């Protein structure tokens, strides 16, 4: 299943790099939860607990993890939070250069963490899927715009510490065009949009340069509907304003009375329909009862004839029904209630 599959080319990259010179950053590839690691060789496994242990072996303390992948399926952030390690999720699409909204959101998280934690041994872990391209771009952007490091030097330091160079040329070209940004203010930037469902198009709004188009742009069909409704409202207001007389209270009362009258007529019509239906049902029941009564009377007459032929004249037949029976010779004398009793007795016998 895709949910438990190992990321493509994940095994080709080192698990974790060194702390980047002059910063508090350490880059690593995405750690995987146990369900996914079950498909990985034991020597190549790398999970959240391994991140903590490897950083501790380097003589540092992991204080914050910034996840810039575009999915939540790789591990549970609670595995870090339960160890009192802060975790921040910033959805960042791959292949395209991360937007300024994503980059400045990263800046905000880092600046707030540094101001809050003065421990020199505490480091910030950053990862994307492989911990190279997106991670390298965003970390180098911080080094250039916040620390004033030359773009080329920033990329060299990152590549050396990570053990893998930034591969994507658009990322490198964009970094070379950046410089120190003294105007940066925490929180003074466009917001990061949440993850979109259809990411296969590689055209999500979070990766477009600012200012971006609104995410709630309407389709042409919806726009046409809106224009049509606006035209109807304008036409209605124009007609009312140019009418020969105003729509006063008297007209409203007439309209209300007319509506009440129509409602009463509809209710009366429903009552008539219901009454007609009940009459038809009653007639059908009467016909059915009469038909069954006639069939039962004729069947009893045949049984009596059979008894006479079998030699039971003058004697009591074993098939004689001792229950009181209504007159069967004259069907008309039975009446409606008598017919019903005959039918019921036939059913019970």
Image: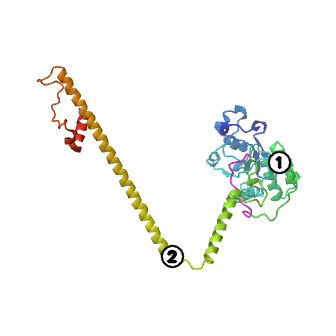
Position in image of residue 46 (x %, y %) = 70, 38
Mark 1 vs mark 2: give the one in front: 2
For disc 2, the neighbor class at 10 Å (few under 14, some 14 to 19, many from 20) is few
Query: Residue 143's image quarter?
Result: bottom right
Determine whether, in the image, residue 71 is placed left or right of residue 291: right
- What is the secondary structure assignment of the residue under circle 1? helix
For disc 1, the neighbor class at 10 Å (few under 14, some 14 to 19, many from 20) is many
Most extreme residue toward the left is 314
Residues shaded magenta:
186-200
Whole-number angstrom distance, CA of label 1 to CA of label 2: 80 Å
Position in image of residue 294 (x %, y %) = 26, 36
Task: Answer with mark 1 or mark 2, whichever residue precedes in sequence.
Answer: 1
Number of numbered tags placed on the structure image? 2
- What is the secondary structure assignment of the residue under circle 2? helix
Circle 1 residue: 158
Q: Quadrant of the N terminus?
A: top right
Determine whether, in the image, residue 167 is placed left or right of residue 121: right
Determine if the magenta segment contains residue 104.
no
Determine if the magenta segment contains residue 193.
yes
Viewer-proximal residue among 66 and 246 = 246
Please give the name of the residue rendered at 70% of the width and 33% of the height, measured from the top-left corner.
40
Give the vertical position of 202 relative to 316 (above or below): below
Instruction: Answer whether residue 219 is visible to the viewer in this image.
Output: no
Circle 2 residue: 251
Query: Residue 185's image quarter?
Result: bottom right
Determine whether, in the image, residue 20 is placed left or right of residue 89: right
Q: Quadrant of the C terminus?
A: top left
Asked which colour scheme the image uses, the reply is rainbow
Instruction: Answer whether residue 318 is visible to the viewer in this image.
Output: yes
Give the vertical position of 220 relative to 34 (above or below): below
Position in image of residue 144 (x %, y %) = 83, 56
């Amino acid at each position: 299943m895709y949910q438990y599959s190992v990321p493509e080319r994940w095994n080709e990259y080192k698990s974790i790099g060194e702390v980047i010179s002059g910063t508090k950053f350490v880059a690593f590839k995405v750690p995987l939860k146990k369900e996914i690691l079950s498909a990985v060789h034991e020597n190549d496994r790398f999970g959240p607990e391994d991140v903590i242990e490897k950083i501790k072996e380097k003589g540092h303390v992991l204080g914050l993890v910034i996840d810039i992948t575009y999915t939540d399926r790789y591990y549970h952030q609670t595995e870090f939070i339960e160890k009192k390690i802060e975790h921040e999720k910033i959805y960042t699409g791959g292949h395209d250069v991360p937007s300024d909204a994503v980059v400045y959101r990263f800046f905000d998280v880092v600046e707030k963490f540094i101001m809050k934690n003065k421990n020199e041994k505490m480091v910030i872990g950053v990862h994307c899927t492989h911990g190279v391209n997106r991670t390298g771009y965003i970390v180098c952007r911080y080094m250039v715009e916040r620390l004033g490091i030359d773009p080329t030097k920033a990329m060299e330091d990152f590549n050396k510490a990570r053990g893998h160079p930034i591969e994507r040329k658009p990322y490198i070209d964009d970094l070379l065009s950046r410089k120190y940004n003294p105007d940066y203010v925490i929180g003074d930037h466009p917001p990061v949009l949440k993850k979109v469902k259809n990411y296969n198009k590689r055209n999500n709004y979070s990766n477009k340069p600012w200012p971006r188009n609104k995410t709630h742009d309407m389709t042409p069909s919806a726009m046409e509907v809106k224009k049509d409704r606006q035209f109807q409202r304008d036409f209605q207001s124009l007609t009312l304003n140019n009418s020969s007389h105003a729509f006063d209270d008297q007209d409203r009362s007439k309209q209300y009375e007319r509506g009440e009258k129509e409602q009463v007529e509809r209710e009366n019509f429903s009552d008539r329909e219901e009454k007609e239906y009940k009459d038809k049902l009653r007639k059908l029941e009467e016909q059915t009862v009469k038909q069954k009564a006639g069939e039962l009377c004729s069947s009893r007459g045949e049984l009596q004839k059979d008894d006479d032929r079998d030699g039971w004249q003058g004697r009591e037949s074993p098939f004689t029904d001792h229950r009181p029976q209504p007159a069967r010779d004259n069907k008309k004398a039975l009446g409606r209630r008598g017919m019903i009793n005959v039918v019921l007795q036939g059913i019970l016998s």
